[in-house]
Image (tube, rainbow, N blue to C red):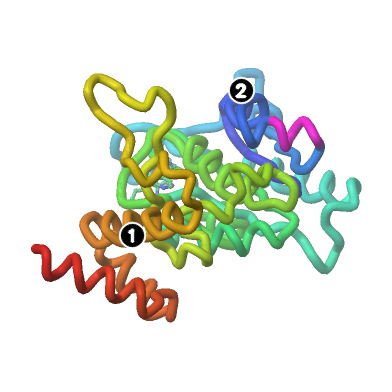
């Protein structure tokens, strides 16, 4: 899998390439991340990538041409590398609050592809003509505004890369995750490690019992409990997807009655 980032701040890619799960997978060649600076696709002495907005207003707007040249260079490079083919080119994706919100299901979908060209805006935004002509899809992480698209792009990539085959060890397996189909999109149960007593707070006794079946049942119950309390919408979603057993429903009923 290969991602290409168009960004004025290529150094920001280090966060993902050099650390943790994504860093290890990068080192092992399971995915790559190439950064392309629009400044390298300018032709003036000042390497200008932004200009004042037509119609007036504050701030600056990213010019279309350096971004377009970057996309074209990336497409040529991906073809040459054999990552894409003429009839299967990577989508150009803009990180923007105007996009469809990213979800775990999208991450799973992306994990089955060959990557994407991610455009990171800065300043007040990007000349609309570039968006109209080149961008296939806009993706949002939620209803908030950042000072640039980079962090959103890195979050998106991280959510995809960790789902690639061989990236996670068994121990940290995606099977264990919240939003895993096996957990039917419920939140994860709480975690504890040594010491057994920390500042007068003890570890739930079941977890110390060594009784695997009881531990599993406890975790499922905690999951249901937490999700019902904090994200009842996710419980409803799990129910609609047929992901709740009769035992799960009984557990939720017991919770209702205890309130
Ligand atoms: C900003 C914006 C605000 C309201 C409606 C649409 C919008 N599009 C953009 C936009 O593309 N902004 C550029 C990227 C330039 C300014 C910083 N940018 C940005 C991306 N801010 N916030 C995001 C973002 C991306 C994904 N998820 C949440 C926020």
* Residue situated in front as seen by the camera: 159 or 90: 159
Confirm whether residue 98 shows in the render.
Answer: no
Q: Which residue is mark 1?
A: 221
Q: Quadrant of residue 108?
A: bottom right
Q: Quadrant of the C terminus?
A: bottom left
For label 2, the SS is: helix
For label 1, the SS is: helix
Q: Where does ligand 1 appear, by image quarter?
A: top left
- Report the side of 157 relative to 4 (left or right): left
Give the image location of residue 229, x and y in percent.
Answer: 21, 57
Q: Which residues, given as a range, are shown in magenta?
A: 24-28
Q: Which residue is mark 2?
A: 11
Q: Image point 83% across, 68% down: which residue?
A: 87
- Report the side of 231 relative to 10 (left or right): left
Give the image location of residue 13, x and y in percent.
Answer: 62, 29
**Mark 1 surroundings within 10 Å by alpha-carbon count, few (fewer than 14), some (14 through 19), many (20 or more):** some
* Residue situated in front as seen by the camera: 257 or 66: 257
Q: Image point 48% across, 44% down: which residue?
A: 210
Seen from this angle, which residue lies furthest left?
259
């Amino acid at each position: 899998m290969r991602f290409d980032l168009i960004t004025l701040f290529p150094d920001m890619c280090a966060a993902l390439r050099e650390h943790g799960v994504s860093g290890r997978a990068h080192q092992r060649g399971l995915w790559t991340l190439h950064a392309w600076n629009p400044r390298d696709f300018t032709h003036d002495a000042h390497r200008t990538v932004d200009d004042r907005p037509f119609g007036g207003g504050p701030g600056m707007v990213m010019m279309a041409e350096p971004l377009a040249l970057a996309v074209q260079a990336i497409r040529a490079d991906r073809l040459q590398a054999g990552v894409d083919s003429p009839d299967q080119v990577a989508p150009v994706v803009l990180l923007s609050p105007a996009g469809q919100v990213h979800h775990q299901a999208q991450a799973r979908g992306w994990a089955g592809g060959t990557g994407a060209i991610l455009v990171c805006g800065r300043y007040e935004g990007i000349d609309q003509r570039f968006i109209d002509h080149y961008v296939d899809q806009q993706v949002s992480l939620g209803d908030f505004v950042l000072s640039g698209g980079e962090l959103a792009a890195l979050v998106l990539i991280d959510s995809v890369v960790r789902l690639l085959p061989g990236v996670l060890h068994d121990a940290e397996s995606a099977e264990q995750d919240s939003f895993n189909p096996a957990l039917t999109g419920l939140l994860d149960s709480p975690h504890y490690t040594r010491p057994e007593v920390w500042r007068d707070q003890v570890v739930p006794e079941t977890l110390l019992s060594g009784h695997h079946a009881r531990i599993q049942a406890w975790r499922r119950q905690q999951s249901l409990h937490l999700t019902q309390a904090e994200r009842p919408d996710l419980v409803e979603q799990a129910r609609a997807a047929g992901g709740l057993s009769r035992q799960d429903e009984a557990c939720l009923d017991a919770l209702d009655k205890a309130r």
